[in-house]
Image (tube, rainbow, N blue to C red):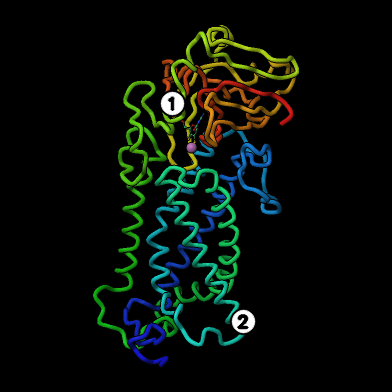
């Protein structure tokens, strides 16, 4: 039965002349490099959320030892998160054809019988299930998150984070076992093909090289239709595959990407009316309440900073103007070094209505409670009357429609 060519368990069932060690090895080595970068930029992105600072930044329960590497996210260079997350998302999208081609190239092995020849072979096959399952899981959750805008409210983080660790464990084992063979196969070109080659191949319609060019072409197409979302400015229009048909930012000073509109967040004109809105500061000096007019009488500062979302899109630098966070910390009673701060929005519901910032982010002179952008008042959708803007921070920490800042012990 094993050799019945009508069944995928027979090697005669698989007839593509493209399959072979060299073809798989080239794709495998591309993935080895690419997935290593995805893993590192993914861990970096998680650290950028400052998850060990405050539970409001972290919806991943019991990350425990997996958080061993967390470090204090720096406040510069200002494009840091823009770059690392742009690379993470763009590379993830670009690797999709490579991953699919690689899986296709080894699919006959999924069906080989007997399922296990030895204990070592059995272990290897189990690790391959984790590897393939893990890869598909990570790519699918990542793509869904960027395409559908937070489809897993609150749960994407734990899924993608735990998934990454399961996947990378299987990936390291696989790479350690296979990379030497792959390097040899690529160096020696066509020798040593027996393992993956079809015993009775169908006539070729494209060469192996040609097939690799097709995969590369697919990746290139994805690249040019995605990368514009991370470059911002006029190039954003080239990002045909990037999502966010949602809110049209329009033109003018406030005409840059909108994540969630004021309407979506349930912010009304009454909430932000000058008579009603007050910024509430809390610290050792007690509670201080400031109107927007009073904020405008404080020293005003400018910084040119981007917004860079976890979804990979980012804006070019915008010119923000407002009050330094460290000046507000001083008003709240922290004259010396500013402490951490909990920022709360007027928004009543939703995971992104609160964020905690680290002392180094509060003390950076570029960190503002912005009142103006590009020379104009913030628009309602960009956070009027006031929003946070901090260099190098993920977009989710740039809280809009700020109502309250609580300085100190988080
Ligand atoms: N209150 C509040 N602030 C928020 C959000 C939110 O949903 N509510 N979204 C955040 C996210 S995820 C991003 S990427 C940025 C986007 O800012 P923009 O809409 O001005 O481009 O705002 C952040 N600030
Ligand atoms: Mo975001």
Residue situated in front as seen by the camera: 195 or 110: 110
Residue at left 40%, top 58%?
Answer: 96
Residue at left 35%, top 32%?
Answer: 247
Q: Position of residue 408 (x, y in %)?
A: 72, 26
Q: Earlier in the sequence, mark 2 or mark 1?
A: 2
Q: Position of residue 271 (x, y in %)?
A: 49, 17
**Where is residue 108, by image quadrant?**
bottom left
Residue situated in front as seen by the camera: 302 or 359: 359
Q: Is residue 181 above or below residue 314?
A: below
Circle 2: element type? helix
Residue at left 59%, top 40%?
Answer: 48
Task: Specify the label residue 361 is tagged with.
Answer: none
The C terminus appears in which quarter of the rendering? top right
Q: Is residue 269 above or below residue 197?
A: above
**Where is residue 25, by image quadrant?**
bottom left
Marks 2 and 1, Cα distance to the nearest angstrom?
58 Å
**Where is residue 54, by image quadrant?**
top right
**Seen in the image, is 145 located left or right of residue 324?**
left
**Mark 2 C-beta closer than 8 Å to ligand 2:** no
Residue at the spot of label 2: 120
Dot 2 alpha-carbon crowd within 10 angstroms: few under 14, some 14 to 19, many 20 or more:
few
Residue at the spot of label 1: 262
Circle 1: element type? helix
């Amino acid at each position: 039965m094993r050799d019945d060519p009508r069944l995928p368990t027979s090697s005669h069932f698989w007839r593509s002349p493209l399959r072979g060690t060299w073809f798989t090895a080239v794709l495998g080595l591309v993935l080895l490099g690419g997935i290593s970068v995805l893993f590192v930029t993914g861990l970096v992105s998680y650290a950028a959320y400052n998850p060990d600072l405050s539970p409001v930044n972290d919806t991943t329960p019991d990350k425990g030892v997996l958080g061993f590497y967390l470090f204090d996210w720096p406040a510069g260079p200002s494009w840091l998160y823009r770059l690392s997350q742009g690379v993470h998302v763009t590379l993830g999208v670009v690797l999709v054809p490579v991953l699919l081609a690689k899986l296709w190239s080894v699919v006959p092995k999924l069906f080989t019988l007997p399922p296990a020849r030895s204990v070592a072979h059995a272990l290897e096959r189990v690790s391959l299930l984790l590897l393939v399952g893990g890869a598909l899981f990570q790519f699918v959750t990542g793509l869904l998150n960027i395409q559908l805008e937070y489809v897993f409210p609150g749960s994407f983080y734990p899924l993608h984070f735990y998934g990454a660790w399961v996947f990378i464990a299987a990936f390291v084992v696989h790479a350690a076992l296979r990379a030497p063979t792959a390097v040899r196969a690529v160096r020696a070109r066509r020798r040593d093909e027996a393992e993956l080659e079809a015993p009775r191949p169908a006539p070729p319609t494209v060469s192996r090289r040609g097939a690799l060019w097709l995969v590369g072409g697919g990746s290139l197409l994805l690249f040019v239709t995605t990368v514009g979302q991370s470059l911002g400015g006029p190039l954003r229009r080239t990002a045909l595959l990037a999502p966010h048909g949602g809110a049209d930012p329009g033109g003018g000073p406030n005409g840059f990407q909108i994540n969630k509109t004021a309407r979506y967040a349930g912010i009304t004109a009454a909430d932000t009316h000058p008579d009603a809105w007050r910024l509430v500061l809390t610290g050792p000096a007690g509670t201080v309440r400031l109107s927007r007019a009073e904020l405008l009488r404080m020293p005003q500062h400018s910084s040119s900073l981007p917004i860079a979302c976890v979804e990979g899109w980012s804006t070019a630098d915008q010119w923000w103007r407002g009050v330094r966070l460290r000046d507000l910390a001083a008003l709240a009673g922290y004259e010396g070094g500013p402490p951490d701060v909990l920022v709360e929005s007027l928004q009543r519901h939703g995971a992104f209505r609160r964020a905690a910032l680290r002392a180094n982010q509060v003390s950076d002179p570029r960190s503002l409670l912005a009142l103006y952008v590009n020379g104009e008042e913030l628009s309602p959708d960009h956070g009027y009357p006031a929003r946070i803007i901090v260099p190098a921070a993920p977009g989710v920490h740039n809280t809009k429609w700020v109502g309250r800042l609580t300085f100190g012990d988080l």
